[in-house]
Amino acid sequence: MDKLKLFRNFILISIPLFVLCVLAYVLPFKYMSTEYVIWYEEYANSDSPAIDAKTVLVGDSRAKSSILPALLHEDTYNIAIGGATPMEMYYATRNYIEKNGAPQNAIVTFAPYHFCDIDNWDQALYYNFLKPGEVFEIYTKALELKDPVITKKGRIGEMVSYRLRLPSKYLSQMYEGKFTGNLSSNQERFDQIRDDLGYCEFGNAAGDDGLTHECYHEYFDYIPIVTLYYDRLLKLLIDNNVNVVVVQPPINQASSDGMHQEFLDGFTGYMEDIAEKYPQITVFPEIPVYDNIYFGDSIHVNRKGAALFTGDLRDKLEGIGYWDKNK
């Protein structure tokens, strides 16, 4: 009798936990914060692209916020993801190509510090952006390379908890979002990103003189697994006969003044090595520097800055006949 009672109590406890897991799985767009929308939009774009893009913009939040597709070139879409490193972006781009075919052109843009810091891996896990096999592949490679962030103590338990949508990981956000209370704001942001062809503004101040992440690195202390996946991303595009160009996002004047010369020299050297390793692609190693008024926060340009950078990039690409390679 005691065993039967114990089993009954176990079932009674398990039912609400199971229901919460199911709700966490099926309702993320309705309860997650608006940051989730940027990752979700990439899911949606892979399955049902907003346009038949001939040119895709690939990268992180600076790529997402620095280039306005409508001002750059016709049939352009920004599939960059805020918070992504080359690891997540490799799988996102591979999935995009598998679902929609290879684009003619790809402009690859990552903040230099994203080669040195894995600061959003928990976010990628939290949003379940990657398939289980992709997470396992990254984790296995991280073990080989002894990466301390991806393979930290307790990481496997965390990965399982995120995959199962356990309440310990999601209940607080579900409560904060009132289960379905964020649907309207998330839909509004999703529609805005789609209307802007994948562009998303991260900072909207009328200027910012704060220092960017790169200023806190004395030298270019790149992470092996990130550079490994950067290579894999470039090879993926090259193998699919995509016309690739690598450009650097702008930084504000304050950050340019505060950046260590050893870091800048190291990053520039790395980009020059990429250009030598892949002669079939075009690499611009220089980091543009804009006045502080063009930045919405210390890291990202505002929309005015995005328009300026997009115009400068368009002129630069037209100057080297980039678009003519498709003719």
Image: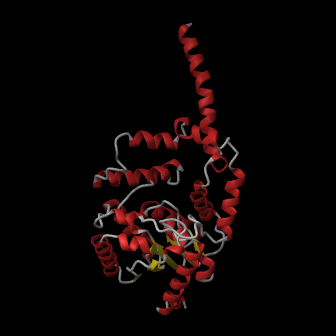
Location of residue 112 (image quadrant): bottom left
Left or right position of 251 against 45? left
Mark count: 0
* Quarter placement of the N terminus: top right
Location of residue 227 (image quadrant): bottom left
Of all residues shown, which one is farthest toward the right? 184
Vertical side of 262 occupied by 20: above or below? above
x, y percent for residue 150: 37, 50
Of residues 147 and 118, the one nearer the viewer is: 118
The colour scheme used here is secondary structure
Location of residue 277 (image quadrant): bottom left
Left or right position of 144 against 244? left
Of all residues shown, which one is farthest toward the top? 1
Vertical side of 260 occupied by 310: above or below? below
Q: Residue at x 47, y 64 (%)?
A: 89
Left or right position of 323 against 286? right
* Quarter placement of the C terminus: bottom right
x, y percent for residue 23: 64, 40
Q: Residue at x 50, y 77 (%)?
A: 106
Of residues 184 and 164, the one nearer the viewer is: 184
x, y percent for residue 249: 46, 74
x, y percent for residue 221: 29, 63
Left or right position of 299 against 24? left
Q: Residue at x 48, y 65 (%)?
A: 298
